[in-house]
Image (cartoon, helix red, strand yellow):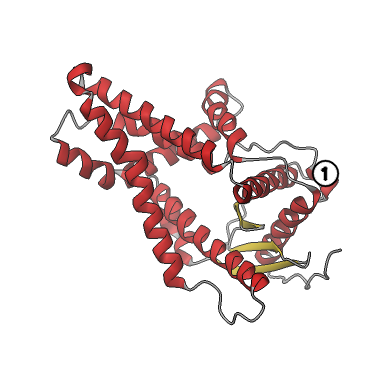
Amino acid sequence: MADQTPHMYGGQAVIEGVMIRGRNHFGLAVRREDGSIERHQEPLSSIYNGRPRRWPLVRGVLTLLETMLLGIKALQLSANMAVLDQDHNAEDGISGWVMASTLGFSLVFGIGLFFITPLLIAWALTPVLNSDFLSEVVEGAIRLLFLLGYISAISLLKDVKRVFAYHGAEHMTVHALEAGLPLTVENVRRFGTPHARCGTAFLLTVVVVSVFVFALLFGPPLEWRIASRILLLPVIAAVSYEFLRFSGSHQDAWFGKMVAQPGLWLQKLTTRQPDDAQIEVAIEAMETAIAADAGKTLPKLANSP
């Protein structure tokens, strides 16, 4: 029997566009250089919707993998459109191995910057701190400062500002859908850019949960600590997901509101107010995903002025 529970749509911003993950498909809408909006829909792999997706802890790891793999795929599609806009004679866009290499480099860079470097700094301060648990707290604080500093730094870039605006448009469109309103620019404009289910909240939760998970190691040698920051990432992701899932199911209670608030504050850095053209793209992405889940394909759009 098909699952009849309401699906919570969500997605991410890409290059000049938005990707929305539906129940069984994802929808992508991208603003082309000529002003038109190009849509793309594709079924999701069974790994994203299979039975393991309902298993506690395992579903958190699968969600993390889905976010990376589906996000990279959507980015590749939007990047290919950007390449074709810049070079109309180009036969191919960005190859899969280039995107895979980019993902690999990003993972190494992210683990090195947000996990290994804070560990090394806290390790150097161990003689002063004289406490393993306090060392873990300091490491977590440094990790949080690095995260805030990194987001603040990239938010100054012109292209990233546009991505963050599309991020805001995606959230506003999800709000309008969840409120049961017709998806028009005017209705979407009624909502703010923060959303409780944003991945930004997940990143913040990972930072907090990592303090307690790493504190359970009780001061192993430095080599083991470095290895643990890599090997325990799936565990931290799983615990963080379950924590957010629980708090999200109690979002009207004081506990749920307290947990959600820091993530909403952080989104003031990762989202911006979109213009009407960006909201139109987010609406098209949402309608594409909804139509695909219903077994429909939307007609091709005419060029926008």
Q: Which residue is mark 1?
A: 187
Q: Which percent across, then down, holds residue 145?
A: 43, 30
The percent coordinates of residue 267 (x first, y second) are 59, 35
**Is residue 243 among the parts visible in the rendering?**
no
**Within-10-Å neighbours for mark 1: few <14, some 14–19, many 20+:** some
Tell me the quarter of the picture where residue 260 sits: top right
Q: Position of residue 21 (x, y in %)?
A: 59, 57
For the question of whether residue 285 can be seen, the reply is: yes
The quarter of the picture where residue 85 lies is bottom right
In the image, is 225 to the left or to the right of 201?
Answer: left
Between 81 and 40, the residue placed more toward the observer is 81
Which amino acid, mark 1?
A: Asn
Q: Is residue 23 above or below residue 96?
A: above
**Which residue is rendered at x = 82% and y = 44% of the image?**
187
Q: Nearer the viewer, residue 157 or 91?
A: 157
From what the image shows, is residue 101 above or below residue 179? Answer: below
The residue that appears at 82% across and 48% down in the rendered structure is 185
Residue 181, position as x, y percentages in the image:
80, 45
Circle 1: element type: helix
Relative vertical location of residue 12 with respect to residue 152 in this rendering, above or below: below
In the rendered image, the quadrant that contains the C terminus is bottom right
Total tally of numbered discs in the picture: 1
Q: Is residue 297 above or below residue 158?
A: below
Q: What residue is rendered at 34% in x and 34% in y? A: 210
Residue at the far left: name it: 221
Which quarter of the rendering shows the N terminus?
bottom right
